[in-house]
Image (cartoon, grey):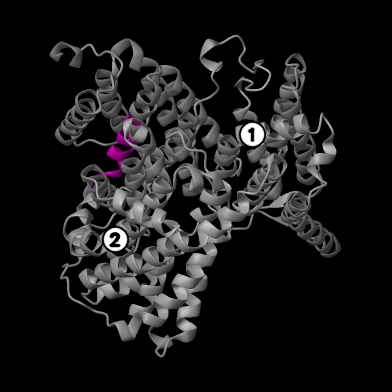
Amino acid sequence: MFNDIMNGLLALLDFWTIVAMVAGTSLGICLGALPGIGATLGIALAIPFTYGMGPLPALALLAGIHNGSSQGGAIPAILLNIPGTPGSIVTSWDGNPLAEQGKAGGAINLSAISCAVGGTLSALSLILLAPPLAKIALSFGPPEIFWVNVFGIATVAALLGDDLLKGLLAACFGLLISTVGLDNVSGHERYTFGMLDLVNGISMIAVMVGMFSFPPAWSLAVRARKEALQNKPAERYKIISERIWTLAGVWRAWAVASFIGIINGILPGSAIASFIAYNEAKRVSKTPERFGKGSIEGLGAAECVNAADNASALIPTLTLGVPGSNVAALILGALLIQGFQPGPQLFRDAPTIVYGYSWALVFTALLLIPLGGSVASRVFANVLRIPTLILLPLILVIACAGCFASQNSMFDVYMAATFGIVGLAMIRFDFPIAPVIIGVVLGAKAEFNLRVSLMMSAGDYGILYDRPICIVLIVLTALIIFFPLYRMYKDWRQRRKDGTPRQASTGPMH
Amino acid sequence: MASKDTISSIVVFLFSLSAYVLAADFGGGAELFPRGLAIIMMVVSALMFVRAVFWPKMVPEGTPRMEPADVKRTAICVLVTIVYVALIQPLGFATASIAFIIAIAYAMGFRNHPALWLTAVLFVGALYFLFVRVFHTPLPEDIIFGMFH
């Protein structure tokens, strides 16, 4: 294992991989700095570009975008009090007061270092925790792998939105999309309606780019039109890069936030890690009264936790093939596009790639110190001057070019636009998007393992529930699904007793 | 008026029913997975319908609603995008993209013409160069940029 880890590190010492890491991190910071665009949209747009790249430069680019966008979100949060990403909401609580005190440059520097600390510790946790888990998972047969996939899909369906029923429907829709085309086992055509373009199935890139790029771009334009007159200029504060923090002042906040972020990444579903980390950092702080008024600990904790779940979220993704977040689902798709089957066998069959990618997450986190600090405050903050109304068509043009280039097919562009419209309708009707993508990514694998299991047992379904690991996974899946159902039932009984109707949700997480 | 959940549960149920019926022709075991999924979707959408009818959602006071102007703007964005996607093949990528950037920004109220035209031409030119010259990936044959080949 040690040799594999070192080989992964050495593989990064390639000119184009280093260029990809620097470019990806810079691009990520810029994308994160643009309110409404974050890691998910950035990676969705970048994936088609990685089609023609080697596996390691491609993954290094995505690692850079992933880590860069975590820090980029802090720039508008600090300068304009507009969080660039959902995770940056907490950043603005202390970042913006610091900017108002004339410490904008120092605040951006602190945010970059905090992200670097969280991102590095998270990537190291991936390198240390993933191999033992992969070793256990390697003993899984087709029935266990089928249930791992079902468990992953159920987890995302139940936890990544706030409505279990809609999450399940979205996941099943994604799984159904994955069945379109030629059946790998029997050779039958499914849902092709006589169209040759559908025989090879619906392109994963088209679904990912369509659902994650088109609806946000449209919403961004509509919002920008509404808020056109309310935008504050980025150069409102004089940006002086002074050091405003000391290690003794922030280490507690970093320790608490890193731990919470890493655990949050491994156990998907919590969208409130930054709030928890902020509260815990305040609890252990010697100066809790400063929180909300420009506390360096508050800002440090908020930014550290934002980056700390980046790499750790990939532990279940890389070892079990079960993505726990939107970005993880996209990374899973990127691995499949590069010809790798995510799961425990990845550590056995392509250790250089998987450890190389893990090290790329470490280095791109460290790159945030030079790129995310003074460079971000002087150079990348200028992206805030780009009129948002121009961004909409640019995003869509990149999305269409990327979709076409991935397979030289206009049909993929038509599919992306179609799924963009479907995605928009889903958002309007409060359905989460992430389970669809996870269904598309895991569908073929889940079906293949189900069919192989049934062939192994000559059609006896008992093979799916007579193995100990299968039983554990079935129980876990049942708990994931039935616990929210039970909560819903209890809520319904309580409200029926009180005579109050059901409260509308605040909307799913996209 | 029917709630969003009522409408969506009916649409999803009909969609799943169609998926189930269409899967009948597959055979060779290929129908197993899609039919299973369709059944799950029908059950879940029925549950959603029951929930929407007997336990409707209450939208809290003060929740921002989408204004008719926003619906109109979204519809314009979607329509212009559809037209753009349809024109990529006949006009070529670069020409259609430049026209799209200008048209949609103009439709959304952006009036800084020099910035708009310059951004459109430079951005599409850079993207075209990146794909065709750097990545060696052809984009749909273009009536303007094709002349420079």
* Quadrant in which the N terminus of chain A is drawn: bottom left
Q: Nearer the viewer, mark 1 or mark 2?
A: 1
Q: Quick one: label 1 or label 2, which is nearer the N terminus?
A: 2
- The magenta stretch is A386-397
Examine the residues drawn in magenta and state their main secondary structure. Answer: helix
Question: Which label number is shown at residue A242?
Answer: none
- Residue carrying label 2: A75
Task: Please say whether residue A389 is one of the residues in the magenta stretch.
Answer: yes
Residue type at the position of mark 1: Leu
Packing grade of label 1 (10 A; few <14, some 14-19, many >=20) is many
Q: Chain of mark 1?
A: A
Q: Can residue A34 be seen in the rendering of this structure?
A: no
Could you confirm whether marks 1 and 2 are on the same chain?
A: yes
Query: Could you say which quadrant of the image residue A396 lies in?
Result: top left
Q: Position of residue A248 (x, y in %)?
A: 32, 86
* Residue drawn at x 63%, y 57% as measured from the top left: B60
- Residue carrying label 1: A175
Q: Can residue A100 be seen in the rendering of this structure?
A: yes
* Residue drawn at x 73%, y 16% as measured from the top left: B26
Residue type at the position of mark 2: Ile
Q: Nearer the viewer, residue A421 or A147?
A: A147
Q: Position of residue A69 (x, y in %)?
A: 35, 54
Q: Position of residue A53 (x, y in %)?
A: 31, 34
Q: Position of A131 compared to A462: left or right?
A: left
Q: Position of residue A377 (x, y in %)?
A: 20, 61
Task: Please say whether residue B58 is one of the residues in the magenta stretch.
Answer: no
Packing grade of label 2 (10 A; few <14, some 14-19, many >=20) is many
Q: Nearer the viewer, residue B58 or A478?
A: A478
At mark 1, the secondary structure is: helix
Query: Could you say which quadrant of the image residue A365 lies in?
Result: bottom left
